[in-house]
């Protein structure tokens, strides 16, 4: 069974979408993240090097949302998951990307995609 570190409601402005105005004008994106890993050592040692720094993770996600461009939020979520699994000793991640200002043509609360990815044997 995996322990988790969760980051919820990380808000950024980025240019992701298929429409030309989405590619040029920043809009809000919200990222929720669940990182699955064994936290026993960190809990026993109280040592940051035994876990994942959520401040570092936030900075990585911020860079991807604010500096990279994707047509689909599915691709953004996949890029976040891939990066985190390559960078940290995670068993898996669940990434949700919300696009609350998506051009839908009418009122709505939210549009979001959620993906869950596991580490491949030999990674991280």
Image (spheres, grey):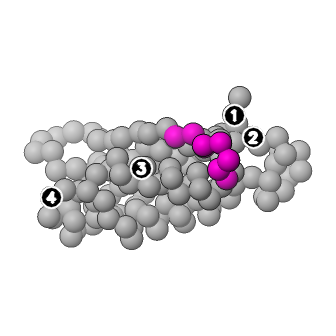
Of residue 90 and residue 30, the one placed in the foreground of this image is: 90
Q: Which residues are magenta?
A: 117-124
| Precedes in sequence: disc 3 or disc 2 | 2
Q: Residue at x 58, y 51 (%)?
A: 85
Q: Earlier in the sequence, mark 1 or mark 3?
A: 1
Which residue is situated farthest in the left direction here?
Answer: 105
Q: Measured along the vertical axis of the image, is residue 124 above or below residue 60? A: above
Name the foreground residue: 79 vs 49.
79
Q: Is label 3 in contact with label 2 (beta carbons under 8 Å)?
A: no
Between the residue at mark 3 and the residue at mark 2, the CA separation in whole angstroms equals 23 Å
Name which quarter of the figure residue 120 lies in: top right
Measured in 3D between alpha carbons, the distance from the residue under mark 1 to the one under mark 2, in whole angstroms, is 6 Å
On the image, the x and y values in percent for residue 6 come to 59, 44
* Earlier sequence position, callout 1 versus callout 2: 1
Q: Earlier in the sequence, mark 4 or mark 2?
A: 4
**Residue at label 1?**
2
Q: Residue at x 40, y 62 (%)?
A: 65
* Residue 77, numbered circle: 3
Mark 1 touches mark 4? (CB < 8 Å) = no
Q: Return the x and y of residue 73 as percentages of the image width and height.
A: 32, 50
For image coordinates 84% across by 46% down, the residue present is 41
Write down the quadrant of residue 40 in the picture. top right
Whether residue 9 can be seen here: no
Task: Confirm whether the magenta stretch covers residue 17.
Answer: no
Marker disc for residue 38: 2
- Please tell me how crowded label 2 is: few (under 14), some (14-19), or many (20+) other residues with Cα within 10 Å: some
The residues bearing labels 3 and 4 have C-alpha atoms spaced at a distance of: 19 Å
Mark pair 4, 2: CA separation = 41 Å
Residue under circle 4?
A: 19
Mark pair 1, 3: CA separation: 21 Å
């Amino acid at each position: 069974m995996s322990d988790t570190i969760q980051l919820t409601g990380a808000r950024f402005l980025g240019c992701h979408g298929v429409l030309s105005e989405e590619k040029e004008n920043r809009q809000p994106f919200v990222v929720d993240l669940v990182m699955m890993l064994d936290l026993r050592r960190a809990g026993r040692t109280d040592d940051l090097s035994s876990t994942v720094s959520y401040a570092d993770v936030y900075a990585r996600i911020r860079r991807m949302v604010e500096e990279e461009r994707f047509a689909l939020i599915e691709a953004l979520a996949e890029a976040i998951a891939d990066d985190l699994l390559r960078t940290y000793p995670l068993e898996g991640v669940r990434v949700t990307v919300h696009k609350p200002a998506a051009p839908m043509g009418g009122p709505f609360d939210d549009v979001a995609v959620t993906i869950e990815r596991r580490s491949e044997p030999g990674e991280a």
